[in-house]
Amino acid sequence: MVKKMEKKETKKKVTKKESKAPKLAVKPVQTAPDIVHVDQEEVQEEKGLRFFLVIAGIVLLIIALLVVVPRFFESDLITLDDYHQANIGGEDLDNAYMYNGFSFVYYDGLWYTQILNQYTNTLYDVPLHFGPQNLTDVSLSGNLNEYFLLLRNNTIPGDNLASTYLTFDPDSEQMAYVGLATGELTQNLAKTLSLAFVPACTKRSEDCAEVPVITCDNTDDPVIYLKTSDETGVFGEGNCLVIQGTEMELVRATNRFLLGLYNIVG
């Protein structure tokens, strides 16, 4: 009887151990903290995304204000003709004024006035580097009438009825300014007087191999001589019209001649 009881107790112990084993196996793995940690990261990401969107919205709003708001204060004057019309109408403009009945507008770095070509009945905007208020001290002297009388009766080859030689010294060290004065002169007179220009040089050189040598003394045809000189001015000598100056003063003298020709500056 004793032996049997011992066996039963042994079985009880074994059974007791076996009954505990499932409880240990079922014991939950501690994953809850990890799950909570993932949720916090998502929350932080969402907060960061919302913050980024708010900042981006503010930046876009600032950009929109910088672009749109100035438009409410912008002038309605956009084109050169708009400025001319406003100037002629008496509006007070910082970049324009009237002079002897002509509108002058500073636009894209140049002064513009409107001149009628009587031969084509076309109104042109002619560009100048200087307005009339900056040209009154440039002298215009001599007799210019003979030069203009020769324009319709010259013997310069070409199809254009009004032609003139345009000559300069090829050895001048101020060719950039000579070129600037040449462009302003030819562009103006081609538009307003339908005048044709025949390029020439005062002496033979490598750069002047293909053009005639023309001075104020070797032809009876009309000649415009762009001359670099320390004295700024315009003067007429028979068939020759001399426009002279140094650097931008040569351009200023050219503008003075043009506005004198248009009867704007006397």
Image: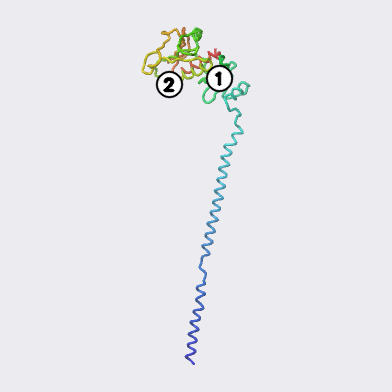
Residue extending furthest right?
89
In the image, is 38 to the left or to the right of 87? left
Task: Name the image quarter holding the C terminus.
Answer: top right
In percent of width and height, residue 47 lies at: 55, 52
Residue of label 2: 176
Q: Secondary structure at mark 2?
A: helix
Neighbourhood count class around disc 1 (C-alpha, 10 Å): few under 14, some 14–19, many 20 upward: some
Q: How is the image coloured?
A: rainbow
Above or below: residue 155 compared with residue 20: above
Tell me the SS state at disc 1: strand
Q: Is residue 157 visible?
A: yes
**Residue 87 appears left or right of 181:** right
Question: Residue 124, labelled with which disc?
Answer: 1
Residue 62 sits in which quadrant?
top right
Discs 2/1, front: 1
Residue flagged by tag 1: what amino acid is it?
Answer: Tyr
